[in-house]
Amino acid sequence: MDIQSLKKEIESEGEKIKTASELASFKAGYTGKKGSVTLLFEGLKEIKDRDEKKEKGMQINALKNLVEEISALKEKELISLKRAEELKDIDVTLPPHEAAQGSLHPINLVMDSINSVFMRMGFTIEEGPDIELAEYNFTALNFPDDHPAMDMHDTFHMENGYVLRTHTSPIQIRAMLKRQPPLKIIAPGRVYRRDAVDASHSPVFHQVEGFMVATDVKFSDLKGILNVFTEEIFGAGLKTRFRPSFFPFTEPSAEVDVQCVNCRGKGCKTCKSTGWLEIMGCGMIHVNVFKAVNYDPEKYTGFAFGMGVERVAMLKYGISDMRHFFENDIRFLKQF
């Protein structure tokens, strides 16, 4: 068949295409491995005259382009027909479904609430790197070299003296190395520990560290600020108590408890019948921490505190399992 006759045939066959299978057969019949146009290309090898070969090649190439153009056009037509068929039973005059509105994650909600409370009391927000120098994460915070928290089973150690920070307290060191008192800072962020996942533990969670340094900071200042914080977060009327404790970077140190938000101190399953829930640790900044950042401990005093955001969120919203925060179950998240 000559080229002109083949061109007319291609145009004629193209008009007959009504289905996707017919379109596939059309393309295979002309430009497939054994298609009519493909065989013409192979026949060019037998033409010896260079000009004739060039002319014939251009004509065959035009046939190939014609097949591709018809195929593309028919493909669009078939898609449009399919779409029209799918939409024919849809009443386009009906109102649309109401768009679902997103919301902040409960951890972000609580983090923002915590930050807001302290910012209203004059604290500023400071941030630091997640990959931290072990010197800032431990040594400058008065951790002894044999402290259990520095072991491989508690800390993600990296090369060249770096770790994934186990708390946001290194931001305290970075801030004090950069600036002189007075300082009044909170440091929210993500932290990492080698914990197995269960209802109350995760290898990744969130903390808010806070500290204040000036010439006459007292433990009573710390108690007053934290009492305001607990009332703002958990509601007025709940009492707090401070129990003696130990942290390497504070002396004296204390654990802070708040009256159970569920039973308000009467005793229930949530508080294990004690009437109290632990929410954070705190204390006066240790002299050795001031020495590590070249602050004069005879001139300055300060306090620090730190809390787990997931812990506060669980108490605030009555959530019993920490894993809910990370499973992305829309039924859980949409409640907030």
Image (cartoon, rainbow, N blue to C red):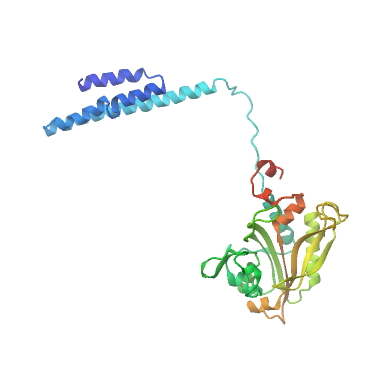
Determine if residue 293 is in view: no
Count of numbered circles on the image: 0
Q: Residue 250 appears in which quarter of the rendering? A: bottom right
- Residue 182 coordinates in the image, percent (x, y): 70, 73
- Residue 239 coordinates in the image, percent (x, y): 85, 60
Seen from the viewer's position, the closer of residues 204 and 177 is 204
Residue for point 27% across, 27% down: 34
Seen from the viewer's position, the closer of residues 279 and 18 is 279
Image quadrant holding the C terminus, namely top right
Q: Residue 328 appears in which quarter of the rendering? A: top right
- Residue 116 coordinates in the image, percent (x, y): 72, 57
Seen from the viewer's position, the closer of residues 306 and 248 is 248
Vertically, is 289 above or below 236? below
Residue for point 74% across, 56% down: 312
Determine if residue 217 is in view: yes
Image quadrant holding the N terminus, namely top left
Left or right: residue 61 compared with residue 278 = left
Vertically, is 241 above or below 234? below
Left or right: residue 318 compared with residue 30 = right
Residue for point 64% across, 35% down: 99
Residue for point 73% across, 61% down: 118
